[in-house]
Amino acid sequence: MQTHSFVISKSHHDKPLDVVLVMLLPGFSRRKVRRIVDRAGVKVNEKPVHIASWKLQAGDRVSVCFEEEALSLRLFTYSRDWLLYQAHGILVINKPPHMPSQQTKNPKVAHVIPFLRAEDPLLAKTEWVLCHRLDQETSGALILAASNEKATWITEQFKARTIHKKYWALCYGIPEKKEWEVKGYLSLISPQSGRVSSVKSGGRSAHTRFRCIGENPKLGVSLIECEPFTGRSHQIRVHLQESKLGIVGDKKYGLTYRTKLPYQWGPMMLDHQLLHAKWVSFSPGEGMAPVEVVAPLPLNFDTCCRFAGFSIF
């Protein structure tokens, strides 16, 4: 257990809590401070503070108490609002950012199916099967099936490319065209770098269509609708980087073309990459018409879009 105590000086008066703690705690990042705050590990004048941007006053007594191991674990608050569609043996959820689609190397990190079964008694009655995956930091529509047979029905639609998906990505830069496509070949994920790259041969075919649905030249950001026709790892992220449009918050591919954004965006864009599986269409059963499911944006993504003036909601 680590503990730290401070009395706020006049030089730190009226400054945000997370900014001050980064100054006072060597080696601490604002992200780490926010995780401590999220876990009620910071008290101001002996009262827990749950807002990282809380303005401190001269003379405030601040205490910080946390366990290092606990900071590596993400806390999720379940709500039935996560459930976007449930019928015909198919469940579509709005996966939050940071939650892995499946088991990771760290058994303490919650992933989708065990978490849902533990949190929702109605879902606990079914042995759900994951039909596809989203990157850990990517949020949005994720399809589960109530049986292996139903999962096969969905995966066969993926193979036949009759399931259609659209993502939203908040990107650095303004595209030269309103609509464009990227086709090529992508490598597998490198075990050394964790990255995917375009290759001329020996890779897997990848095809994505893009459409600009919002732009703010003053901030130097744009909102891009992404429609992948293939499902390669990191496909959208790589194709946007090649289009000189890195995704805000993407630590692997989004840094090359980043621009300076307002201070207020810091806590939002640094938390996770702003890529969201916004829409999916599939047939729930043989002979049945396709259904369309729309996943609301996570709060910080939504806030950034509204801040940029994108009136598409």
Image (spheres, grey):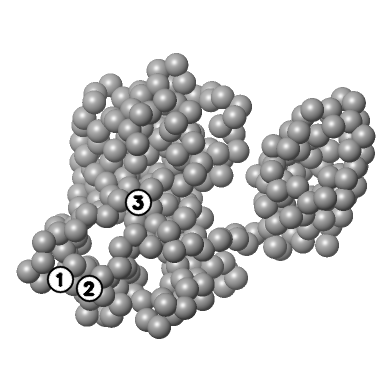
Q: Which mark is residue 88?
A: 2
Disc with the residue nearer the chain's start (1 vs 2): 2
In depth, the one of 200 and 174 nearer the eye is 174
Q: Which mark is residue 285?
A: 1
Task: Determine the secondary structure under disc 3.
Answer: loop
Disc with the residue nearer the chain's start (3 vs 2): 2
Q: Position of residue 120 (x, y in %)?
A: 47, 73
Q: CA distance from mark 1 to mark 3?
A: 21 Å
Q: Position of residue 276 (x, y in %)?
A: 38, 47
Answer yes or no: is residue 254 visible: no
Badge 3 amino acid: Ala
In depth, the one of 127 and 1 nearer the eye is 127
Task: Determine the secondary structure under disc 2.
Answer: loop
Q: CA distance from mark 3 to mark 2?
A: 19 Å
Q: Residues within 10 Å of mark 1 (few under 14, many from 20)?
A: some
Badge 2 amino acid: His
Q: Pick out the residue farthest to the top.
A: 218
Q: Residues within 10 Å of mark 3 (few under 14, many from 20)?
A: many
Position of residue 199 in the picture relative to residue 284 (left or right): right
Q: Position of residue 248 (x, y in %)?
A: 46, 36
- Evaluate if marks 1 and 2 touch, with contact meaning CB atoms under 8 Å apart: yes
Q: CA distance from mark 1 to mark 2?
A: 7 Å
Q: Residue 227's quadrant in the figure?
A: top left
Who's the residue at 43% across and 72% down the image?
Answer: 113
Disc with the residue nearer the chain's start (1 vs 3): 1
Position of residue 66 in the picture relative to residue 252 (left or right): right
On the rendered image, what quadrant is the C terminus found in? top left
Q: Is residue 241 above or below residue 131?
A: above
Q: Mark 3 = which residue?
A: 295
